[in-house]
Image: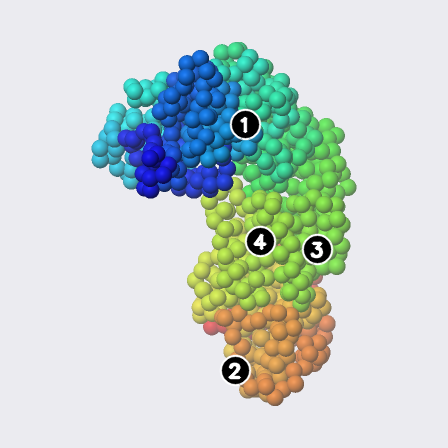
Amino acid sequence: MSADTIPGMTAHNLPVELTRFVGRAEELADIERLLADRRLVTLAGVGGGGKTRLAVQVASRQLDHWPGGVWLVDLGPVTDPDQVARQAATALGVLIEPGGDPVQALASQLRQRRLLLCLDTCEHLLDAAAALAETVLRGCPEVSVLATSREPLGVPGETVWRTPSLKEDEAVELFADRANLVAPGFDIRAAQTDVRAVCSRVDNIPLAVELAAAWVRALSPAQIAAGLDDRFRLLAGGARRAVPRHQTLQASMAWSHALLDADEQTVFRRMAVFSGNFPLAAVEAVCGGTLAIVGRLVDKSLVTVRETAGRAHYRLLDTVRQYAAERLAEAAETTETRSRHLDFYLASVEKAEPGLDVQRDNVNAALDWGLSTSDGRGRQLAAAMARRWFVDGQVHAGLGFLRRALDPDDRSALQAQLLAGIAMLQTISGRLSTAEATARRALELADENGDEIARGRSLAALTFCHFFTDFELCQDTAREAQRVATEPFFHDWAAIIEGYSLTTRNRHEEATAIARRVYERGDRFCMAFALGIQQWAALETGRLREAAEIGEEQLEIVTAIGDYFAVGTLVSPIALVSGMTGHLAVGRKMMDAVVRSIDEMPDADAVGFEHTMGWLHLWDGDLDNAVRWFGRGIDRMAGNTREWTAARCLPGMTAALRHLGRLDEAWTQAERAAEIATAYGAPYLLAEALDEQALLIAARDPGRARDLCHEALALRRDNGLRTYLLKSLDVLIKLELDAGNEAEAARLLAAAKAARAEIGYPWPPLENPPELDTDTIDPPSLDDILAVVTRGRGPRNRPQVGWSSLTPAELEVVRLIREGLSNPDIAARLYVSRATVKAHLTHIYAKLSVANRTELATVAADRENRLPPA
């Protein structure tokens, strides 16, 4: 009775492994699934990649599935194609008649058996191995074949499974296991970082990891990692009994290389200049290769192929690339090939060819080589790459290359473009003062050379810088940038910043008109920011649900871009909307990734993330972290400089300090907020500051608090800030309760509840409304409430004389007069002209009936207890 019919009995010739098989659980499962319904599966991959060990492990797990046994045919030692079938027959114990066709004879012997035939190491005998596999598969319906080869067999019905490198953790585990064989007691925990570095340098290829681990007997992991630059020398000398081609990686690569024809060897060695992914067009231009040659190199597992963004891209593993580089140097072709490589990527970048994002390593390699030469092409490539680095958020790398490309003695248009590129990247890394200085240098050279490219980029950078300090100057610069920019991207980017400068002043209709025009032009980066302008308009004007919907479209666009600056800047308001609509946990989760990327990356920044983090923590009642985040934003305002992100954090900081009972500090922040908001001409920010001031002095000066609240209401009403009207309404409710007017407070609360439900703006946990009976009240509309509470109040109907007649800006001037500041000092502190200060004083003297500064200081001192709370 044969083994096919005896239950529980199997036959095989699989080797007994002397070392532990590590990892590959997912791969084993994948291959077994394929074998369940495919009759020929080929494990293809680079030499040393673990194909044989993987096949043996799969085969050993398959023993119970094959009554006729699992048989391994090692073709490695075979050099004569005629011996392939005989080698297989020997492995299976099948007799072949001398002089007959060995393939047909073998097939006839296996026709009635159900078994798995494993053909190992087929690449140097492809035709013979393919003939054997095809004949057996056609004539033996119960036989399946599992093959290993550096390239597919090319048999009909073949399923090719590309063998990947080990996962990082698996490679580390393999290293530790093999190291313990030569150095018992080796402690991986003490050398985790160095071992990971070793594994990474050898691409996590099993053979390379094992050879490296063997050196633990003489070197520490740190020494091994340091020595891997000369890896082929270091890793010489595998086990004496290993097959020769596996004794070193050099031998493993040489084994494959010797099998190539002359054209294949030429293209292969020239591919050494590529780093990471590269397309067929690059191979054709740089290596003189054809699709047919590249295909054969892929089949031989010297080149890997993958589909990225719908296009095929090729890649050499680092280990293979180094071997190819040695062959390139031997052929004395390195300089010539690298020069063609630089030309190809310079042309691709200047034409803005698609797919360059997945070839970043190649562009960097071209830059690195080009900047080491003196012919200027590397500098040209650096200048051309500036916009892509900006959009991709590659600030650190981009600045490094652009600075290398600068020539301190050059005053050409190219130097202007390089400086303009540096300025653009500095704007999104938080270095605004440096960016402004660099942009002005670039602009000077651009004007000197009449270069519109550098001029447009420089002005776009200046536009961004001015946004944080002076909205009117920002708008003027943006319009000039749009007028001269010859590149559509920088035209649109300047337009976007102009739109945001209008948004901050609540001129939403003008801002959204700009945003729509930019959005329609279709650049994804600018489209995402254009949606941000529309989102702010919806957020502030009582359309929170629409703001959330816009945020969803933004997320879809910005996630595809993948740039930390765009993601961080645009996710922040999306997360803010989530918090405002009652989804604090969602907002915090969104921001976690943003904060982590900014904190962990050099030269990383995003606009306004501190402001959002502060409010999300504050609304959740986490006051200490709210203070920390608002403080981080305020720190952007060094000395007396003005900075928009810092200014936006001041009202939030005031609220957090107020809730903590730190009232004097809170008042100081509220005063700063009102002062800077006035200088910016930002109604939203000024109204926030006024409401906070009202809450701080409500107990000591309820009349003044009411005036401040009504002033905030009027600002919000007149500027269409419908969402934030509800904040002023909350202050009014408190003031009415403090005054004992519970009925009026309940009426206002009923209106607030209805309006918040309509807008989708619930009270946050920290700001729960008072418990008043509103069930029997027919809530008035928000517009009706506004008509009543603002009648006869607000800046348009302010009293003509007395302290209540003073505007917030005039009150700030009074405070600074009390501090003894001169008119020039006050102008500098408030970011206004001296003439404006003089005009304020003229109005103040008239309203308070005083004659001069001295008398004003005396009157103000008498009223000191009416200002900040005790």
Task: Give the amino acid at mark 4.
Answer: Val
Q: Earlier in the sequence, mark 1 or mark 4?
A: 1
What residue does disc 3 label? 502
What is the distance, in whole Å, between disc 1 and disc 3 at their CAs? 67 Å
Circle 2: residue type? Glu
Alpha-carbon span between mark 2 and mark 4? 35 Å
Q: Secondary structure at mark 4?
A: helix
Which label number is shown at residue 571?
4
Q: Are marks 3 and 2 in contact (CB under 8 Å)?
A: no
Q: Disc 1 designates what residue? A: 155
Q: Residue 403, can we see it?
A: no
Sequence-wise, the earlier of marks 4 and 3 is: 3
**Which dot marks residue 771?**
2
Q: Tell me the mark number nearer the camera, choosing from 1 and 3.
A: 1
User: Closer to the observer: label 1 or label 2?
Assistant: 1
Q: Amino acid at mark 3?
A: Leu
Q: Residues within 10 Å of mark 4 (few under 14, many from 20)?
A: many
Residue 82 vs 761, above or below: the answer is above
The numbered mark at residue 295 is none
**Mark 2 or mark 4: whose residue is earlier in sequence:** 4
Which structural element holds mark 1? loop
User: Which is closer to the viewer, label 1 or label 4?
Assistant: 1
User: Is disc 4 in contact with disc 3, using a CB cutoff of under 8 Å?
Assistant: no
Which of pointers 4 and 3 indicates the residue nearer the eye?
Answer: 4
The answer to whether the residue labelled 1 contacts the one labelled 2, judged by CB atoms less than 8 Å apart, is no
Label 3: which secondary element: helix
The earlier-in-sequence mark between 1 and 3 is: 1
Query: What's the amino acid at mark 1?
Result: Val
